[in-house]
């Protein structure tokens, strides 16, 4: 019997940049998924709080069964991982999540995928494992996600955010400055339409890059070469967002909360107006947080269309909101829990 833990994540800044080889600055949460189990055997049998127990014979999940036909749908992540690793998906055990359930945009699917990866015995460097997890998630969902969530889940270290260059996959660990605390606030709206809109944004970036070359190398001067106003706005988001990641790393190093707050506000405006992945409820929450005493700045976090908001604030700041929220200390990456 092995027990593994894999965290959710919140992205501080660097949104919709990973799939064009850009910069991201997520951190792992201390909340996540604990997966206890024994692999081998001839069943995939799991209990988990808040879900019906699952008990499937291996014939229900064998290679001949398309992932999309496997129910309940969360089991697809496990089977996709086992297929990527070339091992049997058989496992008996239990899952427990401290992440709030359902569409919070805190990468619970990635946490489940990475927990399964360790439970099925995968070994290797965190970023190599992250790439396997990403492929498995794409297999399970059909959404062509980038590498940020899996890298955050596997490569983060406590008390640090993870600066990753998604182009050359170099990472560095950025200490959280003493004057700032991270709050994560659920908007109350589960992520919706996220999958088709996500693939659509990705395609727009691919079309833009076919005209002007890599967005990562581009500056705002290239916008004049894009005829389509939507392309111009999408490109402007990605180019300025990469810049904001570097600016945030500087603001952290200088322990400058005013600058950090400004960067979050600009990031949110860019996602809402140029990338068009926010929704009015999330915009209102961001506005409300911006007016809260002690909050330096806030923005939507994750893929968008609902989900959660991240705020940087003075340590100890309390919120008056009626949705789920938490203070978030940067946690460590997925790991085997000693017996
Ligand atoms: C989702 C994807 C990530 C990333 C974000 C947007 O979380 O899984 O790869 O693209 O959206 O920044």
Image (cartoon, grey):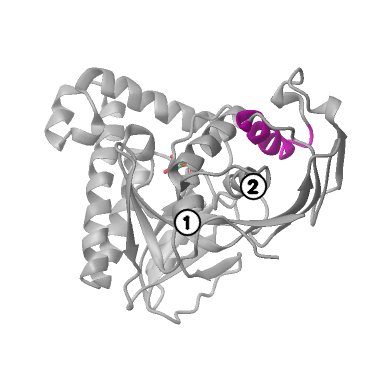
Label 2 CA crowd tier, 10 Å (few <14, some 14–19, many 20+): many
Q: Please, which residue is most extreme toward the bottom here? A: 316
Residue at point 63%, 59% (across, down):
99
Decide if residue 278 is in sight here: no
Residue 15 figure quarter: top left
Q: Tell me the chief SS of the magenta region.
A: helix
Q: Position of residue 272 (x, y in %)?
A: 38, 45
Q: Is residue 205 left or right of residue 258?
A: right
Q: Is residue 285 left or right of residue 73?
A: left
Residue at point 26%, 60% (across, down):
249
Q: Position of residue 51 (x, y in %)?
A: 81, 50
Residue at point 60%, 28% (across, down):
139
Q: Is residue 73 above or below residue 119?
A: above
Residue at point 29%, 27% (across, down):
231
Locate the C terminus by quadrant: bottom right
Q: Which residue is mark 1?
A: 10
Image mark count: 2
């Amino acid at each position: 019997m092995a027990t593994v833990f894999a965290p959710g994540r919140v992205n501080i800044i660097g949104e919709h940049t990973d799939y064009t080889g850009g910069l991201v600055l997520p951190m792992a949460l201390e909340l996540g998924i604990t997966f206890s189990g024994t692999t081998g055997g001839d069943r995939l049998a799991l209990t988990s709080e808040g879900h019906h127990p699952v008990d499937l014979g291996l014939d229900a999940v064998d290679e001949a069964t398309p992932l999309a036909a496997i129910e309940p749908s969360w089991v697809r992540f496990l089977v996709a991982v086992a297929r990527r690793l070339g091992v049997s998906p058989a496992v008996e055990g239990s899952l427990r999540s401290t992440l709030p359930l359902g569409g919070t945009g805190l990468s619970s699917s990635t946490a489940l995928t990475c927990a399964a990866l360790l439970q099925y015995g995968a070994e290797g460097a965190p970023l190599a494992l992250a790439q396997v997890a990403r492929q498995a998630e794409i297999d399970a969902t059909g959404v062509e996600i980038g590498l940020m969530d899996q890298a955050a889940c596997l490569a983060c270290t406590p008390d640090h955010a993870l600066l990753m260059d998604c182009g050359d996959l170099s990472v560095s660990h950025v200490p959280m400055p003493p004057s700032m605390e991270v709050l994560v606030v659920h908007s109350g709206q589960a992520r919706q339409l996220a999958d088709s809109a996500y693939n659509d944004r990705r395609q727009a970036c691919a079309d833009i890059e076919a005209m002007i070359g890599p967005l990562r190398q581009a500056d705002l001067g290239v916008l004049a070469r894009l005829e389509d106003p939507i392309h111009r706005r999408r490109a402007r988001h990605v180019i300025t967002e990469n810049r904001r990641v570097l600016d945030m790393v500087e603001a952290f190093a200088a322990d400058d909360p005013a600058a950090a707050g400004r960067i979050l506000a600009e990031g949110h405006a860019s996602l809402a107006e140029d990338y068009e992945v926010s929704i009015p409820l999330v915009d209102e929450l961001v506005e409300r947080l911006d007016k809260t005493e002690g909050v330096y700045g806030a923005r939507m976090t994750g893929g968008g269309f609902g989900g959660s908001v991240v705020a940087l604030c003075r340590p100890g700041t309390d919120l008056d909101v009626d949705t789920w929220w938490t203070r978030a200390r940067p946690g460590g990456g997925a790991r085997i829990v000693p017996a």
